[in-house]
Image (cartoon, rainbow, N blue to C red):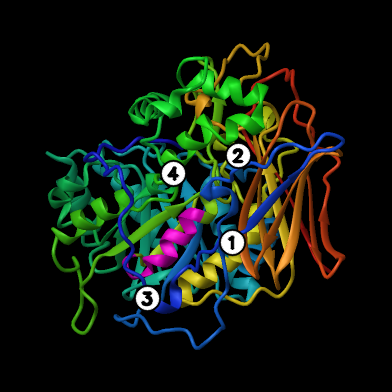
Amino acid sequence: MTVTSVSSTPSSSPVASSVEPSSTPISSTASASNSSSPSPSPSTTQTPSANETISAPTPSAPPVDNDGSRKYVVAHHMVGNTFPYTLQDWSDDITMAHAAGIDGFALNVGVDEWQPARVADAYQAALQSGLDFKLFLSLDMTSLPCASPTDAQNLRNFVNSHATHPNQLQYASRAFVSTFAGENCAFGQASVPEGWKSQFVQHPEMQGKIYFVPAFFIDPTKFTDFGEVMDGDFNWNSGWPIEVTTSFAQNLLSSLPSGANASPLSGLTGIIAAAANDPVTAISSSLTQLQAALSKFIGSTDTDDQHLDGLKALGGGLNARDGEDSKRAYMGAVSPWFFTHYGKDSFNKNFIFLADQHLYSKRWESLIAQRDKFDVVQILTWNDYGESHYVGPIKGAQPNSQAWTDGMNHTGWLEMTGYYASAFKTGVFPTIEKDKIVMWSRPHPCLANAPDGVGQPTNFELSEDSVWAVVMATAPSTVTLATSPTTSQTFNVPAGVSKLSIPITAGGTMKGTVQRDGKTVVELAPKDFTFQGAPQAYNFNAFVASATAE
């Protein structure tokens, strides 16, 4: 699901954080050394994204938010991919998500006539789980019809059928409801705002019963048109730095000092090609400078501030009751990846968003550092296989995405989620109880050629040929990342979370080892990953693997 928001031009620099002391990510530098036998490689200069760390503070009582409200972490669940689901499938998803610190699912529902039955199963499974796990509808208005009052009636009936369910997310004593899109829905009325107002939010069947937080893809300065519609706002595209395109990076590259353009090949593609031929040298020169320039956009909260300013212009809450907080809720997004590869004979979307440099961790860190601004965080997604940003298991019915999804497990990212979710909700980073390493990489070089009729995805040039790693250490450790028996890098990391990376070339594999006091405490060496030099199809999805100490 992709819609590009129309918004004011984002600032080119990240917003300075306003941070509560208890939720401050503590940064330090891990030292790194290279080993490449039999001929040792020269030492490389690591970019900030390659060796940043967060040390976990000593746990304390969770701070109370100024408004006394609870913060939520939810995951977007595509009901359209659950056709074969049974009640047990929903139960398994709910149990797995809850164990990862997720408080509920946003159920993306479309026009298929079978989807209401799956939604009913989800609510039933949540009830039977006995867990404090909430659900709410995310009405997919790119699928659901919205041209007439009858269409609005169908939406009202759907929402009301679950509004009082024990596992429905209640926010400010009302049923929480969201959307994907909807900025073009008038329901037969004179305007879109009038349609949502009279036929949905303030219709007699709904007024005072729902808390409406849509993801309208509009300029936030236009929120005032929806002042009688929006109880809050969901900024869907905040999960990725969508403004960073190939042309954006080319322009940024041209603005760097002349030394950054020293590559004998011209432009961004030339620098990437140089990196492929001599990764150590390139990583320590041109490409590193470009990566450093792009890093300010990874996890940035610029668009969040634009949306928050738009909400602020609306004033107090739409239906706030006496004694309730009048602030309108803001829901930000976090996502680990984005790649979609549909041809013109299908959905006709073939592109990536920049997700390198530990996007998932860095976005979480931004959300935690500025947690007073965010009421809900939505993980994109649990199971959107078509766009490669799933953190749940691969199951159900794929939307013809098997070519780039099969064998590309992402649950290692889910294993990281609990740490960040806990810090966001409480303001305190939890103690790491077990050593863990998570590693991921694309399956082939950025510039590989494949006999693929769909072609290379738009913005493919932004990708780095790297293996990325997150190490969660209970104590200071030595971490070695390797892509072959003769190519490795060693890092000394403190207790806490360290973000590491190592270049990879065709034929490379991935291996990570965490050692302490001369003993191996965790080793990860997935046997089913090889960086393919001659792929048969373009696949910019990520292969993710993890290992945890016993």
What residue sits 73% from the left and 20% below the top?
535
The location of residue 414, given as percent across then percent down, is: 63, 57
Q: To which quarter of the image does residue 231 belong?
A: bottom left
The residue tagged 1 is: 417
User: If you read the primary sequence from the N terminus, does the residue marked by circle 2 or circle 4 appear first?
Assistant: 4
What amino acid type should be assigned to the residue bearing mark 3? Answer: Glu
Check if mark 3's residue and mark 1's residue have beta carbons within 8 Å: no
User: If you read the primary sequence from the N terminus, does the residue marked by circle 3 or circle 1 appear first?
Assistant: 3
Q: What is the spatial separation of the Cα atoms under label 3 and label 4, in whole angstroms?
A: 24 Å
Magenta stretch in the rendered image: 362-373
The residue tagged 4 is: 240
Q: In the rendered image of this protein, does residue 85 appear above or below residue 351?
A: below
The residue tagged 2 is: 385
Instruction: Rate crowding at label 2 as few (under 14), some (14 to 19) or many (20 or more) other CA atoms within 10 Å.
Output: many
Instruction: State which mark lies toward you, 2 or 4.
Output: 4
**Nearer to me, 44 or 114:** 44
Asked whether, in this view, residue 241 is left or right of residue 474, the answer is left
Q: What is the spatial separation of the Cα atoms under label 3 and label 2, in whole angstroms?
A: 36 Å
- Counting every numbered tag in the picture gives 4
Q: In the rendered image of this protein, does residue 472 appear above or below residue 49?
A: below
**Nearer to me, 45 or 156:** 45
User: If you read the primary sequence from the N terminus, does the residue marked by circle 2 or circle 1 appear first?
Assistant: 2
Check if mark 2's residue and mark 1's residue have beta carbons within 8 Å: no
Instruction: State which mark lies toward you, 2 or 1.
Output: 1
Q: Secondary structure at mark 4?
A: loop
Q: To which quarter of the image does residue 330 belong?
A: bottom left
User: If you read the primary sequence from the N terminus, does the residue marked by circle 3 or circle 2 appear first?
Assistant: 3
Q: What is the spatial separation of the Cα atoms under label 2 and label 1, in whole angstroms?
A: 18 Å
Residue 20 tag number? 3
User: If you read the primary sequence from the N terminus, does the residue marked by circle 3 or circle 4 appear first?
Assistant: 3
